[in-house]
């Protein structure tokens, strides 16, 4: 009896809320954005512990663009692609060519965060234009003293994610307006490497999503940006919607293959769970939540797929 009681406590702790389980089995495969990875990994872990203990949810982070190449495959490939930018027209065209129906799901709001080394006590605040000039090839800012009078006469070391990442594309397309980055910028695939490099180089300045700063604020400074109405610090509050940090704010997504969701019930079930819990998970992983009304609309859409799938299954019996 003692053994059975202990076993029950163990299973309850590991299996979470068994009352919510529908007995699903199988796997869900997710890849894509390194920025969105912490959020989706959190949702996957919660789902496997608290919802469906017999479903394996695998989350990887090859980058938004690299992830779409794995996602846009007719037979096989990933079930979801996380993205820190919207899907491109050529990617949509590829999906259409392959006969894939792709559903965009907005999961959170993120703020591009400009980070510096902890020893940097001069560039605590920069204007929008100064940030652009530092990273722009034509900006001509080779030394900190070129940026502003009184800054050190030391070379600027710039860092950022590489071209596989939607964060790079958003920064280049939206913030730099598709103008060339400085030639000597150090672009990296792995965000942990970026954090490490900036934290060890006094004259470093880099950019990535707010969540990576939030989880490494003991190693980095976040630069306040003046967009014309005074310096704004990136926080969960300022990156919400049309907040004060809006010029550097962007939505982040996951994309779902609808055909797979209709054929694989565990894939659709995870999608519904993710959208129901995205708001809570976002705040725990350094993102601002999408308005509840938008999340609910996504849930209702997905529930509709579930109903259609159920009717099809019934008619086939």
Image (cartoon, rainbow, N blue to C red):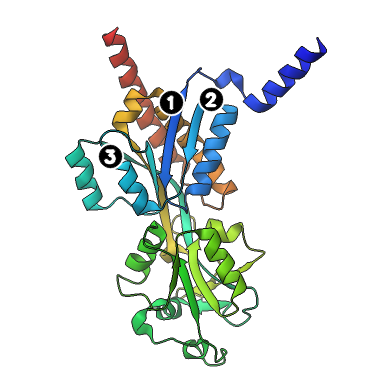
Examine the rendering and report whether any part of residue 222 can be seen. Answer: no
Q: 86 or 75, which lies in front?
A: 75
Residue marked by disc 2: 52
Q: Position of residue 293 (x, y in %)?
A: 43, 40
In-image side of 98 versus 154 (left or right): left
Q: Against 152, is 230 above or below?
A: above
Marks 1/2 in contact by CB < 8 Å: the verdict is yes
| Residue lying furthest right | 2
Q: How far apart are marks 3 and 2 (CA)?
A: 27 Å
Q: Where is residue 151 in the image (x, y as percent from the top left)?
A: 56, 89
Q: Say whether disc 1 or disc 2 marks the residue closer to the N-terminus.
A: 2
Label 1 element class: helix
Residue marked by disc 1: 266
Label 3 vs label 2, nearer the camera: 3
Residue 267 figure quarter: top left
In-image side of 13 versus 260 (left or right): right
Label 2 element class: loop
In-image side of 101 versus 235 (left or right): left
Examine the rendering and report whether any part of residue 30 can be seen. Answer: yes
Q: How far apart are marks 1 and 3 (CA)?
A: 19 Å
**Mark 1, residues whose alpha carbon is within 10 Å: few (<14), some, or many (≥20)?**
many
């Amino acid at each position: 009896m003692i053994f059975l009681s202990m076993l029950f406590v163990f299973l309850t702790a590991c299996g979470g809320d068994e009352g919510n389980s529908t007995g699903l089995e199988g796997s869900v495969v997710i890849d894509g954005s390194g920025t969105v990875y912490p959020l989706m990994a959190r949702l996957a872990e919660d789902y496997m512990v608290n919802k469906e203990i017999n479903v394996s949810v695998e989350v990887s982070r090859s980058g938004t663009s690299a992830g779409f190449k794995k996602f846009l495959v007719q037979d096989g490939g990933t079930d979801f692609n996380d993205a820190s930018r919207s899907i491109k027209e050529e990617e949509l065209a590829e999906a259409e060519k392959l006969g894939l129906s792709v559903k965009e799901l907005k999961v959170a709001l993120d703020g591009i965060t400009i980070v510096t080394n902890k020893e940097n006590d001069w560039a605590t605040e920069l204007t929008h234009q100064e940030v652009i000039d530092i990273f722009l090839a034509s900006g001509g800012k080779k030394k900190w003293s070129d940026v502003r009078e009184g800054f050190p006469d030391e070379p600027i070391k710039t860092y950022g994610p590489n071209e596989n990442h939607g964060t790079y594309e958003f920064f280049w397309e939206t913030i730099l307006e598709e103008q060339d980055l400085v030639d000597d910028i150090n672009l990296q695939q792995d965000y942990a490497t970026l954090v490490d490099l900036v934290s060890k180089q006094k004259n470093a300045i880099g950019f990535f999503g707010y969540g990576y700063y939030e989880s490494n604020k003991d190693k980095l400074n976040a630069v306040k940006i003046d967009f014309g109405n005074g310096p704004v610090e990136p926080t969960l509050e300022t990156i919400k919607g049309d907040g004060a940090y809006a010029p550097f704010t962007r939505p982040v997504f996951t994309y779902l293959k609808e055909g797979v969701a209709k054929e694989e019930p565990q894939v659709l079930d995870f999608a519904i769970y993710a959208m129901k819990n995205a708001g809570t998970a976002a705040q725990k992983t350094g993102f601002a939540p999408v308005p509840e009304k938008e999340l609910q609309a996504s849930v209702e859409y997905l529930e509709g797929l579930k109903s259609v799938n159920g009717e099809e299954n019934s008619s086939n019996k």
